[in-house]
């Protein structure tokens, strides 16, 4: 394989990976350095506005000692600032909410697993005990509307930058 040389690429695309790295500013800097002048980077990721119902349900499951069960996510303003800090000459940060309805917490978690969106933490917390899992399920369903479904939000952030 060839090494990535500075200024070699006119287009770099990353979909769903940037939000899982430990050093987002460093990754953005490497992406910018890999672009030719006027090269384009298009970067898609989940934003901090994602999964509020799941976050609340997990907090309710362990209110006294909540464990870190979800990796940190970047909000739209911070993402734009990171693009600027990485030295992109022009940058655009857009975000789009995607609303999805679930009848149970278990179905949401199964969908996240199927999409490879679990297990992003460096060290996994211990699994929820039965009582905590029951509290999480109840807290999730407490947000249900009249038809028994909970609307969950996935905030899709798209960063576009020119090298």
Image (spheres, grey):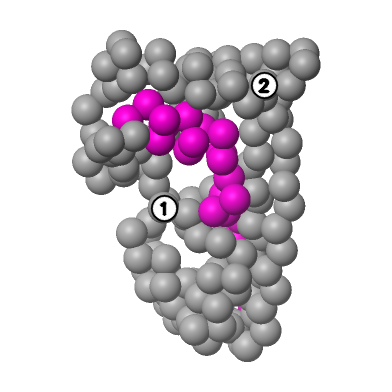
Which mark's residue is nearer the viewer, 2 or 1?
Answer: 2
**Which residue is found at the position 42% from the left and 73% from the top?**
25
Relative height, residue 14 to residue 131 (above, below) = below
In the picture, the quarter occupied by the N terminus is: bottom left
- Which residue corresponds to mark 2? 144
Say which label, 2 or 1, has the lower sequence index.
1
Range of magenta residues: 38-62
Mark 1 Cα within 10 Å, few/some/many (few <14, many 20+)? some
Quarter of the image where the C terminus is located: bottom right
Compared to 98, does 130 lie above or below?
above
Identify the residue at image location x=35%, y=65%.
23
Q: Residue at x 22, y 28 (%)?
A: 126
In percent of width and height, residue 3 lies at 37, 68
Does residue 7 show up magenta in the picture? no
Residue name at image x 63 percent, y 26 percent: 143
Q: Which residue is mark 1?
A: 72
């Amino acid at each position: 394989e060839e090494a990535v040389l500075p200024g070699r690429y006119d287009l770099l695309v990353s979909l769903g990976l940037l939000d899982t790295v430990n050093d987002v500013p460093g990754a953005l800097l490497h992406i910018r350095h890999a672009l030719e002048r006027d090269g384009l980077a298009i970067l898609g990721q989940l934003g901090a506005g994602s999964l509020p119902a799941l976050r609340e349900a997990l907090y309710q499951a362990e209110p006294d000692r909540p464990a870190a069960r979800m990796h940190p996510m970047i909000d739209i303003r911070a993402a734009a600032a990171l693009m600027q800090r990485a030295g992109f000459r022009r940058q655009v940060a857009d975000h789009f909410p995607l609303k999805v309805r679930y009848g149970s917490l278990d179905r949401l978690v199964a969908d996240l697993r199927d999409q490879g969106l679990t297990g992003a933490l460096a060290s996994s917390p211990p699994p929820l005990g039965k009582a905590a899992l029951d509290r999480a399920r109840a807290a999730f369903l407490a947000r249900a509307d009249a038809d028994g479904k909970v609307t969950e939000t996935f905030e899709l952030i798209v960063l576009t930058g020119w090298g």
